[in-house]
Image (tube, grey):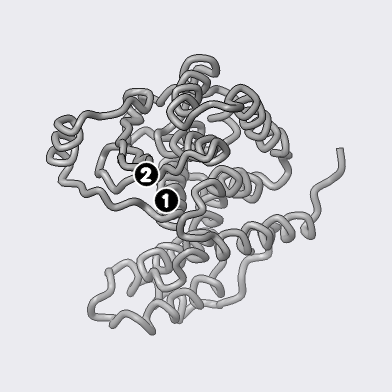
Amino acid sequence: MTRTTTIDVRTKWDKLVLELKNLRHDDIGALVPLCIGIQSVLSPTENYESCLRNLQFMGFELLKSCELKSALERWQRLREFLFNEKGFELSSVAAPQIGEEVLLMQPVLQKRAGHPLPLAFILLNLAGRLELPMALIQARHHFLLRWVRPGETVYLDLYNQARALSEAELIQVLNRSASNLEVWSSKQLMFQYLELLRGAFERARSLLQLHTVFNLLLQLDDANTAILGQRALLRQKLGLTREALTDLKRYFSFVEKAHAPFELRQCLQELEYSPTEACSRPTTEFLH
């Protein structure tokens, strides 16, 4: 096994950032490969090629078994393949206890269980291979897929193995969750995924991984002052005082001090009156 170098880590990071920045609004099929790329920068010494091979092999199996089938038959085959043959299921972990094991693509693919969002990414990726145009709609606290067919739009409930909803069931779900039928863009979904990882790493106090997630969130939305401020606080905690001060100066170029949270004002004061040299520590590969 070859030793992972700083150059290897930087290459992985640069590739992931480029793919995130080039992510198209409707490129739903790219979400699973991006999730694998995220895991590769979170744990740069691990090899995740088997994850991509697993996904590619599932797609190949499906395509072979769907030759000459109609769209409806391809969808029925996909549901049977994913939920029965492969046994994928939604994790029953409550929101406050969601951990990385139900979010990161490697354990989700290996255990065939996880949070609804990465499972939705897998389903959407396979549906795209079968030329079934689907998207995830903006239903709060629910995961509904929209499948646009000639002359018909079908809504599928991921909580019930993607079973089609009747019109009455759809209205009930939307009313209960105060939702609408707009679809999430690929970048919006990736932002949600990173937010879930952020919560998981915060709960686990995995600070270096959390720092990487903040960096990725800011790659998707560099004007997000809330995340910029939170990264500054984390950087101070990690001893990266120069980087923390840079974040805060940028933050306060957008936000008036009187309107900023007390902890950020206090952090700025502490950093302005302390040495700004970053601690000597082997964490440069996580700074990106």
State if disc 2 and disc 1 touch (CB < 8 Å). Answer: yes
Q: Label 2: which residue?
A: 136
Q: Which residue corresponds to the image point at 56% horizontal and 45% vertical from the top-left? A: 35
The amino acid type found where label 2 is placed reads Leu
If the image is split into quadrants, where does the N terminus sit?
top right
Q: Label 1: which residue?
A: 189
Disc sitting over residue 259 in the figure: none
Q: Which residue corresponds to the image point at 40% horizontal and 77% vertical from the top-left? A: 251
Residue 94 spot, x, y in % from top left: 32, 30
Residue 281 seen in the figure: no
Residue 52 spot, x, y in % from top left: 67, 38
Residue located farthest toward the right when viewing the structure as drawn: 2
Q: Quadrant of residue 173?
A: top left
Residue 7 spot, x, y in % from top left: 79, 60
Q: CA distance from mark 1 to mark 2?
A: 9 Å
**Nearer to me, 263 or 104:** 104
For label 1, the crowd category at 10 Å Cα-Cα, with few meaning under 14, some 14 to 19 and many 20 or more, is: some
Please count the marks in the image: 2
Disc 2 secondary structure class: strand
The amino acid type found where label 1 is placed reads Leu
Give the mark, 1 or 2, whose residue is nearer the N terminus: 2
